Image (tube, helix red, strand yellow):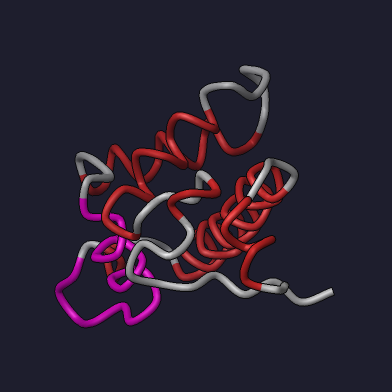
Amino acid sequence: MRVYVLGAGASVHAKYPLASALGRSLTAWIETLPPEHTYHSRLNQIIDAYGELDNFEAVLTDLMTCKPGSIAAGLPPVARQGLIGDLKEAIREHFDTIRTGPAPLYDQLVL
């Protein structure tokens, strides 16, 4: 199964977050998970390193590009790769929980 997430707010009616709100939405979802879940420690690692997730796109960009002198460059490579992998998985799982909800405009789109 393929999932397409349309940008520019096309998915807001289905409860998907805008890119600008993804960090806050992901944080809120992680907070609903059991306290021992790995995503809590990953979230704490990100907050410790970057301070907040208000600009989650910049955090992801930094982690993935790892430019010299960046916050990501100061992380051990194995830890950075593990963090990226868990973030990708967390976003997929978060979106999977949203996917089960109603999306009436998408239903109209396919008619």
Q: Relative to 100, say whether 84 is above or below.
A: below
Residue located at (52% from left, 34% from top): 41
Residue located at (30% from left, 64% from top): 57
Find out whether residue 49 is within the magenta segment. no
Residue located at (69% from left, 50% from top): 99
**Residue 78 occupies quadrant:** bottom right
Asked if residue 46 lies left or right of residue 13, the reply is left
* Residue 27 percent coordinates (x, y): 43, 35
Range of residues picked out in magenta: 55-70
Residue located at (69% from left, 41% from top): 101
Q: Relative to 111, say whether 27 is above or below.
A: above
Q: Main secondary structure of the magenta part?
A: helix
Q: Relative to 50, say whether 110 is above or below.
A: below
* Residue 106 percent coordinates (x, y): 62, 63
Query: Closest to the observer: 17 or 89?
Result: 17
* Residue 94 percent coordinates (x, y): 61, 46
In the picture, which quadrant includes the N terminus? bottom right
